[in-house]
Image (tube, rainbow, N blue to C red):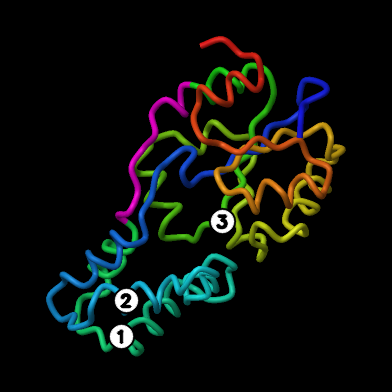
């Protein structure tokens, strides 16, 4: 959706925008642990699921289960004999920083307040905060799925944010890498740009480097 005016607020996704990630990496790391005798594909299927991501991690990102319950369900379903802290480390260490995005967001924050809007879970979010020190300070508020009990691309996710911020949808800019999330935001009336690179977003917003 083309921008017709400068945004009043900017809503920023986390995964593949601020940090890259690979769930397969987590499954491989767990499979390599002492006391684990499951193939990475089986671990991935249980945690993430198929194309619709219906694995147990969806319930975790929705805040329907706790970290304790994630471990307990995973331990029983995958017959894990590894230490819990090793499992959590393996499932968390799946990210890498996208440094140019952080530079861009610092620039964008001078034009309007930023709000983080992420489908995530407690283990992953805390890991990202350690990986990218100070990332949370970029944002006026964090809209994290496990705290909201809502996931993108549910339109209710975006209605919740707009109502919470007391802004009109058309006053918002939303950056996300996934097309279904972009389309859902647009249906709510939010100006959205699919994130493919910082350069693409700069050009879309007519911002200089």
Q: Secondary structure at mark 3?
A: loop
Where's residue 153, x and y in %?
Answer: 67, 57
Residue 139 sits above or below residue 89 on the image: above
Tell me the residue at 24%/70% (across/down). Answer: 30
Please identify the quarter of the rendering in which residue 141 is found.
top right
Spatial CA distance of label 1 from label 2 is: 7 Å
Which of marks 2 and 1 precedes in the sequence? 2
CB contact under 8 Å: marks 1 and 2:
yes
Say whether residue 33 is left or right of residue 175: left
CB contact under 8 Å: marks 2 and 3:
no
Answer whether residue 102 is magenta in the image: yes
Q: Secondary structure at mark 2?
A: helix
Q: Return the residue nearer the eye: 100 or 90.
A: 100
Q: Return the residue nearer the eye: 11 or 187.
A: 187
Which of marks 1 and 3 precedes in the sequence? 1
Eye-nearest disc, 1 or 2: 2
Residue 196 sits above or below residue 43 on the image: above
Where's residue 127, x and y in %?
Answer: 37, 51
What residue is shown with label 2? 43
Eye-nearest disc, 2 or 3: 2
Residue 77 sits above or below residue 178 on the image: below
What residue is shown with label 1? 78
Stretch in magenta: 93-103
Tell me the residue at 77%/26% (across/down). Answer: 3
What residue is shown with label 3? 119
Spatial CA distance of label 3 from label 1 is: 24 Å
Residue 87 sits above or below residue 188 on the image: below
Where's residue 21, x and y in %?
Answer: 38, 50
Spatial CA distance of label 2 from label 3 is: 20 Å
Tell me the residue at 51%/69% (across/down). Answer: 53
């Amino acid at each position: 959706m083309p921008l017709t005016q400068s945004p009043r607020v900017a809503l920023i996704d986390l995964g593949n925008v601020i940090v890259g990630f690979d769930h397969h990496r987590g499954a491989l790391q767990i499979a390599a642990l002492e006391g684990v005798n499951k193939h990475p594909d089986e671990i991935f299927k249980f945690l993430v699921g198929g194309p619709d991501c219906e694995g147990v991690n969806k319930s975790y990102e929705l805040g329907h289960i706790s970290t304790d319950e994630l471990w307990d369900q995973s331990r029983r379903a995958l017959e894990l004999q590894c230490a819990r802290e090793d499992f959590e480390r393996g499932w968390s260490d799946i990210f890498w920083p996208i440094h140019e995005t952080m530079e861009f967001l610092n620039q964008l924050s001078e034009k309007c307040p930023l709000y983080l809007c992420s489908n995530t879970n407690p283990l992953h979010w805390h890991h990202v905060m350690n990986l990218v020190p100070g990332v949370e300070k970029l944002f006026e508020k964090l809209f994290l799925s496990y705290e909201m009990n809502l996931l993108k691309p549910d339109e209710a996710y975006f209605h919740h944010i707009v109502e919470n911020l007391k802004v009109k949808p058309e006053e918002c800019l939303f950056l996300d890498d996934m097309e279904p999330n972009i389309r859902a935001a647009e249906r709510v009336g939010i100006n959205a740009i699919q994130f493919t690179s910082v350069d693409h977003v700069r050009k879309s917003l007519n911002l200089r480097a």
